[in-house]
């Protein structure tokens, strides 16, 4: 079995594009298993109090982007599992990578200017630099 980790945020177009790439893998229907990972970013401060994610976060409440990717993969007869967590996105992707040991990570990148990357960081860049498995980045 060829395992793919597919991190998906809330953007349906990026989720669709990444899922379409998975369907093009050799023998995808017979040999590919995908874990769709949706990470809700952590909040550090809400006004003058710290928010407890247990008060509002639902691990089973997936965004439409996850449904979009799942539909594309299911139509291609690819085995799909989905997970959702609350954490720093790059850290969660890398942690889940070490746990499930996928053969490949497929991510849809965002279009950002070089200055935007410096100021705001990049989940994709962090995963590319720190993952112990190959990473395929799909351009928008």
Image (cartoon, rainbow, N blue to C red):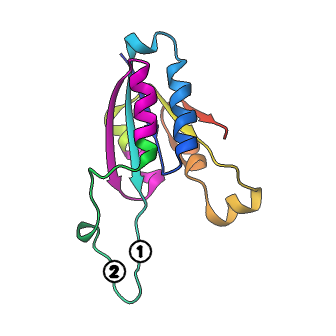
Residue 8, position in %: x, y?
47, 44
Q: Quadrant of the C terminus?
A: top right
Secondary structure under the numbered disc 1 in the rendered image: loop
Residue 48 is inside the magenta segment: no
Residue at the outermost bottom position: 48
| Nearer-N-terminus badge (2/1) | 1
Q: Quadrant of residue 97?
A: top left
Identify the residue shown where x is 37% and y is 46%: 95
Q: Are marks 2 and 1 in contact (CB under 8 Å)?
A: yes
Judging depth in this view, the residue of 125 and 111 nearest the camera is 111
Residue 71 is inside the magenta segment: yes
Q: Which residue is mark 1?
A: 44
Residue 94, position in %: x, y?
43, 45
Residue 82 visible in the displayed image: yes
Identify the residue shown where x is 27% and y is 53%: 59
Q: In this rendering, would 45 be left or right of 122?
A: left
Residue 80, relative to residue 86: is it above or below?
A: above
Tag shown at residue 50: 2
Highlighted range, magenta: 67-95
């Amino acid at each position: 079995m060829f395992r793919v980790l597919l991190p998906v945020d809330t953007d349906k177009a990026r989720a669709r594009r990444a899922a379409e790439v998975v369907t093009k893998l050799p023998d995808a229907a017979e040999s590919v298993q995908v874990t769709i990972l949706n990470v809700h970013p952590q909040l550090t401060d809400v006004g003058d109090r710290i928010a407890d994610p247990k008060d509002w976060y639902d691990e089973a409440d997936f965004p439409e982007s996850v449904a979009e990717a799942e539909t594309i993969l299911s139509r291609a007869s690819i085995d799909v599992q989905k997970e959702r967590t609350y954490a720093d996105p790059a850290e969660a992707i890398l942690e889940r990578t070490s746990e499930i040991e996928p053969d490949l990570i497929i991510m849809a990148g965002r279009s950002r200017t070089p200055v935007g990357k410096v100021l705001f960081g990049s989940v994709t860049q962090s995963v590319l630099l720190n993952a112990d498995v190959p990473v395929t980045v799909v351009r928008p």
